[in-house]
Amino acid sequence: MNAHIDCRIATLQDAEIVTEFSSLCALESENLELDADRVRAGVEAALRDPAVGRYYLAEIRRKAAGQIMVTREWSDWRNAWIWWIQSVYVSRDTRRLGVFSALLEHVREQAIQEGAALLRLYVDEDNNPAESTYLARGFTRAHYRMLERTLATGES
């Protein structure tokens, strides 16, 4: 790692950069161009209400370098929370500096402090570089298949 990386919970004042990073995440990982106003509204909803989701930012010299969003799912089997990692993005100019590793470790420590049982994430089946990154950091392939159903009011 070549740079000192600070990680923190994002605030409403970070809405612009989080919106940008989330949009870039969708474009790079799934080739999806998202509606900027919809993304900003979704980002702001989470920044206003941690029950919706929490964004964590990594910074190098006070400049945003990456993000992770966490949502929580209650597991009755474990009697504990599962933390879902989503909207992972590291800016192009800070890749290979340890930004993702710093964010992941920060989130892992927070999850342990809050009594979570497990970190979980999904990755696009064609995103082999991301999958390799996750596997190299201790994630394993789950025995679940992801299924989804779009609702009339939702967008894919």
Image (cartoon, rainbow, N blue to C red):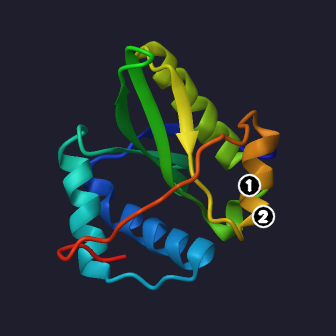
Crowdedness near tag 2: few (<14), some (14–19) or many (≥20) residues, C-alpha within 10 Å: few
Crowdedness near tag 1: few (<14), some (14–19) or many (≥20) residues, C-alpha within 10 Å: some
For badge 2, the amino acid type reads Asn
Question: Which quadrant of the rendered structure holds the N terminus?
Answer: top right
Q: Residue at x 36, y 20 (%)?
A: 76
- The answer for how far apart the CA atoms under marks 2 and 1 are is 5 Å
Name the residue nearer the viewer: 59 or 130. Answer: 130
Question: What is the number of callouts on the image?
Answer: 2
Visible residue check, residue 4: no
Residue 86 screen position, x and y as percent: 48, 52
Element type at marker 1?
helix
**Quick check: 109 above or below 94?**
above
Is 143 displayed left or right of 131 in the figure?
left
For badge 1, the amino acid type reads Glu
Q: Residue at x 74, y 55 (%)?
A: 131
Q: Residue at x 18, y 47 (%)?
A: 48
Label number found at residue 128: 2
Residue annotated with mark 1: 131
**Quick check: 154 above or below 32?**
above
- Label 2 close to label 1 by CB (< 8 Å): yes
Name the image quarter holding residue 91.
bottom right
Q: Residue at x 55, y 38 (%)?
A: 120
Element type at marker 2?
helix
Residue 28 screen position, x and y as percent: 61, 76
Name the image quarter holding residue 128.
bottom right
Is 156 displayed left or right of 46 in the figure?
right
